[in-house]
Image (cartoon, rainbow, N blue to C red):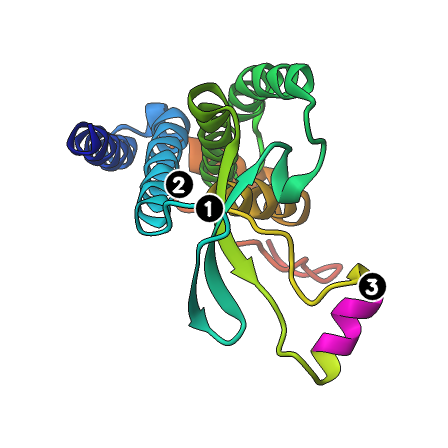
């Protein structure tokens, strides 16, 4: 069974890489190829990392310390990212369906930073799909990334003051894609319109010209 799973994940990686190559060769399919490539590669990375972590940490709360601030921990999350909304299965179904409709729509209507939009939205969708797969197959989301501060010092005092613990809620690669993708969408998805037109045609955006002084020859 594990061999079959890893074979399917390798296939996802190969298809994702192929989508990126197709996007470079055919500019008119670029946004969809980039979104599909990011989605497949992101989904494969999320599922592979979960399989590896839970293979070596088979029992709940099994822990392997990597650094003083980072461990792998077997955690079963019945909620959303970072343990929120536990037990809200209908809520998760609705959010997943909305994401699978909204993300392609945003890519379709994008007029600013089209390449970045396609990749970011593909990774967000990969995160949503990865956690949705876990809920459908296992009934919970497999989390394993465990970050914590040293047992004393400034960071310990800061985190315990605000979170009552020195450990951040356990999370996974899908949560990283969703969170970082949402932040990137808010902060970086914007550029001048002339760059958008050039990007659609597969051309380099024209350099902006400095304004001419009054009376200067054209």
Q: Is residue 186 left or right of residue 25?
A: right
Q: In front here: 194 or 160?
A: 160
* Element type at mark 2: helix
Query: CA–CA distance between discs 1 and 3?
Result: 24 Å
Report the residue marked by disc 3. Answer: 162
Q: Residue at the location (23% across, 30% down)? A: 5
136 over 201 or under it: above or below: above
Q: Residue at x 31, y 47 (%)?
A: 52
| 87 sits to left or right of 146 | right
Which residue is pictured at 49% across the width and 54% down the height? 145
Q: Is residue 47 magenta?
A: no
Image spot of residue 78 (x, y percent): 61, 32
**Residue 157 relative to residue 97: left or right:** right
Q: Which residue is identified by label 2?
A: 46
**Residue holding disc 1:** 173
Q: Residue furthest bottom?
A: 153
Which residues are drawn in magenta? 156-162
Apparent side of residue 206 relative to residue 106 in the rendered image (left or right): left
Q: Of label 1 and label 3, which has the lower sequence position?
A: 3
Marks 2 and 1: in contact by CB < 8 Å?
yes
Asked if residue 148 is positioned above or below residue 17 in the image, the reply reads below
Residue 1 x, y percent position in the rendering = 20, 27
Label 3 crowd (10 A; few <14 / some 14-19 / many >=20): few
Query: Which of disc 3 and disc 2 is earlier in sequence?
Result: 2
Measured from the top left, where is residue 92 in percent x and y?
63, 21
- Pointer 2 and pointer 3: residues touching (CB < 8 Å)? no
């Amino acid at each position: 069974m594990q061999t079959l799973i890893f074979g399917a994940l390798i296939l996802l990686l190969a298809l994702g890489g192929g989508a990126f190559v197709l996007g470079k060769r055919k500019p008119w399919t670029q946004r969809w190829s980039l979104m599909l490539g990011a989605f497949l590669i992101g989904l494969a990375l999320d599922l592979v990392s979960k399989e590896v972590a839970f293979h070596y940490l088979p029992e709940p709360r099994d822990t392997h310390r990597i650094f003083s601030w980072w461990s792998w921990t077997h955690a079963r999350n019945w909620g959303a990212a970072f343990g929120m909304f536990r037990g809200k299965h209908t809520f998760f179904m609705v959010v997943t369906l909305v994401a699978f409709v909204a993300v392609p729509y945003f890519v379709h209507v994008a007029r600013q930073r089209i390449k970045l939009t396609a990749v970011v939205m593909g990774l967000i969708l990969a995160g949503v799909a990865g956690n949705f797969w876990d809920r459908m197959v296992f009934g919970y989301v497999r989390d394993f990334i465990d970050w914590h501060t040293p047992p004393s010092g400034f960071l310990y005092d800061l985190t315990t003051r605000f979170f009552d613990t020195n450990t951040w809620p356990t999370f996974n690669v899908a949560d990283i894609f969703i969170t970082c993708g949402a932040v990137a969408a808010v902060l970086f998805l914007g550029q001048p319109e002339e760059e958008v037109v050039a990007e659609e045609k597969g051309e380099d955006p024209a350099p902006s010209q400095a304004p001419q002084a009054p009376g200067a020859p054209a």
